[in-house]
Image: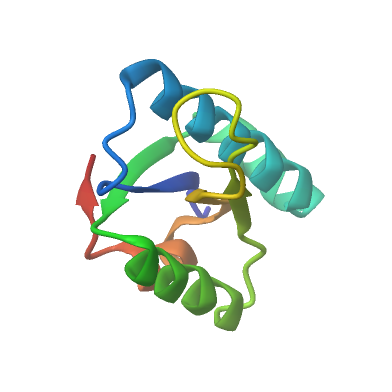
C-alpha cells in the first residue's frame, strides 16, 4: 500500500512572523487539497494525513520547485499574499502540493530542508 503526504514549501527569505507563516502554509494546504485527486485524498486520510513543511531560499528556488512539481504531473498550488499585513500584495510566499503519493512528491522535494 502506498503512503501519501502533503508538502508545503515556504520561502525563507521573507522572514515572515510565525503567525503570518502559519497562515500562508494553511492557504497552501487548503488549495493543494482542493486540487488533489479523490483517490489520493482517501489514501492520505487512511495513512495518517502526513504533512511536511519545507523551505527554499528565495522566489527563484520556489518557482523552480513549482515547475518541477508540475512536470511531475502533480497539481501544486502557488500562494500569493493579499498584502493586508506584513508583505506587499501579490508576493508569492509558498507552494502546496498533495495529498499525493509520497514517492512521487519526494522526487521533487526530497532534498529540501525542513523549515
Q: Residue furthest bottom?
A: 71
* Residue 71 percent location from the top left of the image: 57, 83
Q: Residue furthest top?
A: 19
Q: Residue at image x 76%, y 52%?
A: 35
- On screen, residue 88 versus residue 10, left or right, reads right
Q: Is residue 20 visible?
A: yes
Residue 10 against residue 25 in the figure, above or below: below
Q: Residue at image x 33%, y 31%?
A: 16
Q: Quadrant of the C terminus?
A: top left
* Residue 79 percent location from the top left of the image: 59, 48
Q: Is residue 98 visible?
A: no
Q: Residue at image x 64%, y 77%?
A: 73
Residue 104 against residue 114 in the figure, above or below: below
Total marks drawn? 0
The quadrant in which residue 112 appears is bottom left
The image's colour scheme reads rainbow
* Residue 5 percent location from the top left of the image: 49, 45
Of 27 and 85, the residue lying toward us: 85
Q: Residue at image x 62%, y 32%?
A: 45
Of 90 and 35, the residue lying toward us: 90
- On screen, residue 19 versus residue 4, left or right, reads left
* Residue 85 percent location from the top left of the image: 52, 23
Of 92 and 52, the residue lying toward us: 92
Amino acid at each position: 500500500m502506498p503512503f501519501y503526504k502533503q508538502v508545503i514549501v515556504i520561502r525563507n527569505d521573507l522572514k515572515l512572523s510565525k503567525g503570518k507563516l502559519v497562515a500562508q502554509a494553511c492557504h497552501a494546504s487548503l488549495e493543494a487539497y482542493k486540487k488533489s485527486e479523490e483517490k489520493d485524498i482517501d489514501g492520505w486520510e487512511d495513512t495518517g494525513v502526513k504533512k511536511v513543511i519545507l523551505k527554499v531560499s528565495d522566489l527563484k528556488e520556489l518557482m523552480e520547485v513549482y515547475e518541477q512539481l508540475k512536470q511531475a504531473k502533480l497539481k501544486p498550488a502557488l500562494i500569493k499574499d493579499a498584502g493586508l499585513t506584513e508583505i506587499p500584495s501579490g508576493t508569492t510566499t509558498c507552494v502546496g502540493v498533495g495529498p499525493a503519493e509520497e514517492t512521487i512528491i519526494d522526487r521533487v522535494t526530497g532534498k529540501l530542508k525542513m523549515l
